[in-house]
Amino acid sequence: MSRAILDATLSKNTIFGVNNSTTSTNAIDLGAVLPFPVTEGFTAQIVTTAATNAANNKNVNITVQHSNVNTAANFTNLVKAALTITEVATGYAASTANVALPPNTKQFVRLICQTENAGGNPNDGTATLRLAF
């Protein structure tokens, strides 16, 4: 099922990190607690801004993660490489990707953004995770 209504309160963002670094959004609480993981499929929308600070043609890989508790060490990949921002010598364009979250998604979801080694400095760009209903 395709979702089209975005919930403004269920939106988190982060800037991209510099060369060989990782940044993440704060978690979105889906409100489902054990032993009842989310049973309905949600659409996660990943939106990135255009940016001009880029170099060395390296990528920013964006992954959706989930966890039963809102502690950074407990997050695991839910949707691997949901979106890759391909950098060029001068910058990269804005992008949007819609990803279906599986029915067994745990209570908290977030994005993790990994800038490849020698990836320049794309930190004038952001990634936003939004949930659609």
Image (tube, rainbow, N blue to C red):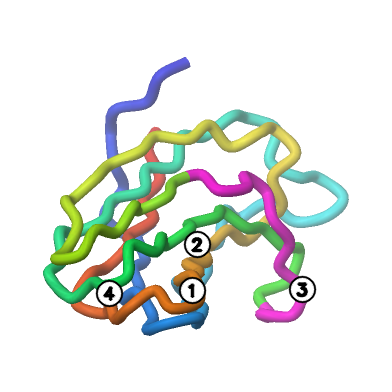
Q: CA distance from mark 1 to mark 3?
A: 13 Å
Give the residues drawn in magenta, as a range: 71-82
Lower position in the chain sequence, tag 1 or tag 3: 1
Residue 31 image position (x, y, % from top left): 60, 55
Please say if the residues under marks 2 and 1 sit with CB atoms less than 8 Å apart: yes
Q: Nearer the viewer, residue 127 or 130?
A: 127
Q: Which residue is mark 2?
A: 111
Q: Residue drawn at (22%, 70%), measured in percent from left and top?
A: 125
Give the numbered dot on residue 24.
Answer: 1
Left/right of residue 24 with respect to residue 3 in the rendered view: right
Q: CA distance from mark 2 to mark 4?
A: 16 Å
Residue 44 image position (x, y, % from top left): 44, 42
Q: Nearer the viewer, residue 21 or 32?
A: 21
Q: Residue drawn at (75%, 56%), measured in percent from left and top?
A: 33
Lower position in the chain sequence, tag 4 or tag 1: 1
Residue 89 image position (x, y, % from top left): 20, 64
Lower position in the chain sequence, tag 2 or tag 1: 1
**Is-magenta flag for residue 100?**
no
Q: CA distance from mark 2 to mark 1?
A: 5 Å
The kind of residue on which mark 4 rests is Pro
Q: Which residue is mark 3?
A: 74
> Looking at the figure, which quarter contains the C terminus?
top left
The kind of residue on which mark 3 rests is Asn
Q: Is residue 38 above or below residue 27?
A: above
Q: CA distance from mark 3 to mark 4?
A: 27 Å
The kind of residue on which mark 1 rests is Ser
